[in-house]
Amino acid sequence: MKYFNEAAETMPLDQIRALQSEKLVKQVRHVYEHCAPYRRKMEEKGVTPDDIRGIEDLHKLPFLTKYDLRDEYPKGYLAVPQKDCVRIQSTSGTTGRRVVAFYTQHDVDLWEECCARAIVAAGGTAEDVVQVSYGYGLFTGGPGLNGGSHKLGCLTLPMSSGNTDRQIQFMMDLGATILCCTPSYAAYLGESLKEMGIKPEDNPLKAGIFGAEPWTEEMRETIQKSLGIKAYDIYGLTETSGPGVSFECQEQQGMHINEDHFIAEIIDPDTGEVLPEGSKGELVFTSLDKEAFPLLRYRTRDICILSRKKCSCGRTFIRMTKPMGRSDDMLIIRGVNVFPSQIETVLLKEGYAPNYQIVVDRVNNNDTFDILVEMDDELFGDTVSAITGREKALVAAMRAMLGIGPAVHLVAPHSIQRSEGKAVRVVDKRKLVTDSQWKG
Ligand code: ADP
Ligand code: ZN
């Protein structure tokens, strides 16, 4: 089995463009008529549905951002009656920034097909046993791959994340052949198997589908070796359904975007100008088929490059690189979205001055997360035990805000280096994708 949906996945480019044009015209009308906040945005820009006659007019439409969605929380961008929806999912809980995505049954089907395509591209067939170790619940990872696996007809193990002993027991006892989880958890499972004395060739896995957070080519190597599998990338965001917007094929050279359902653009994040293919910039998605939450020109903030270079797998869909960074200051730490502004909020609330630095690194495939906070002279004079107590209190406050706990270090006054211009709030030592690794 080479493709889940051959007609779509190998469609010639002129047909893709024609299909996108036809769907875009309809989708713009649907959004304009059913989604008041977006209609207002179009009115502000002086655009009406009549101005959009095909993909060549896409650039006339206004952009959408996470802030727009947050302003209209929870239902402002819902474009069908709520009774027609069957599901919600939500972004990984950064307080005050949650986005709720709504799905009709049609939207769920479409999303699950995208995930089924990804499983087939990773070598999957109905014979496979798919272990889904992404979190289930509001997070899109578990439900997305679970649905894709069902659609393909695989035996699906809805493991969810955590409980590593049970993961390994079910993997071995039920003969899981495809593993779906975050790359950091895959690496952790690899280490755990090794500790248990199970060699890479002795587990039943043949492939893995890993995403939801950035990972490097080096990490791919580590995972492939430790689990004895081929490791494939999958990308997506809650706002566009979830994982499966794009996925890797056997080439392992960038992810094919499901262009029959999504239009991808690359823009200059500062000016909003659309950049030609091959440029590095911010990825923007327009969803063509979604009914309940049909976002047009949604700015992902992910920086990447698109390529239409012919792929040996036969798929004609454009490929994107792994995200190479973000155009905002959001960090993804252990799979959780973290904004420096949230950390600042906690510090100010707890009575500290905003002199801090966030240090993120990756050690043994696990993210480390440290926050250095300067004390003032008075605090600095405190006893060691008083300072330790304050650090503990800050860790608890950070955990409540962010959903994950950093290590907090109270440091001497003026010990964090001051920069001339903007403060260096974030030191991210994790080495992500570099341009030279992209051969697309
Ligand atoms: P959640 O953390 O619940 O998935 P989002 O939907 O906001 O929340 O996460 C989407 C973001 O996750 C993307 O914009 C991207 O930055 C990141 N992401 C998803 N898949 C990948 C991937 N394969 N590689 C790198 N980053 C990814
Ligand atoms: Zn391919």
Image (tube, rainbow, N blue to C red):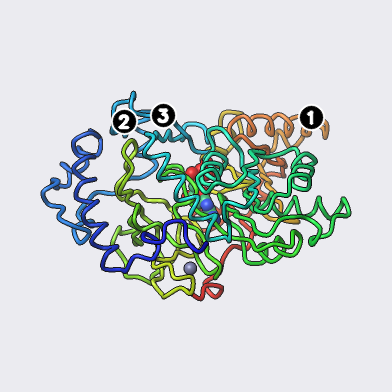
Give the amino acid type for the residue marked by disc 2 in the picture: Gly
Question: Can you tell which quarter of the image residue 409 is in?
Answer: top right
Mark 2 lies on residue: 76
Question: Can you tell which quarter of the image residue 264 is in?
Answer: bottom left
Number of numbered discs: 3
* Mark 3 vs 2, N-terminal side: 2
Of badges 3 and 2, the one in the foreground is 3
* Mark 3 vs 1, N-terminal side: 3
Looking at the rendered structure, the secondary structure element under dot 2 is loop
Give the amino acid type for the residue marked by disc 1 in the picture: Ala
Q: Does residue 376 show up? A: no
Residue 415 appears at what percent x and percent y? Answer: 68, 50
Residue 42 appears at what percent x and percent y? Answer: 19, 44
Q: How far apart are the alpha carbons under marks 3 and 1?
A: 52 Å
Give the amino acid type for the residue marked by disc 3 in the picture: Val
Residue 268 appears at what percent x and percent y? Answer: 35, 62
**Residue 142 shown left or right of residue 8 in the figure:** right
Looking at the rendered structure, the secondary structure element under dot 1 is helix
Mark 3 lies on residue: 86
Q: Is mark 2 within 8 Å of ligand 1?
A: no
Q: Nearer the viewer, residue 157 or 265?
A: 157
Mark 1 lies on residue: 386
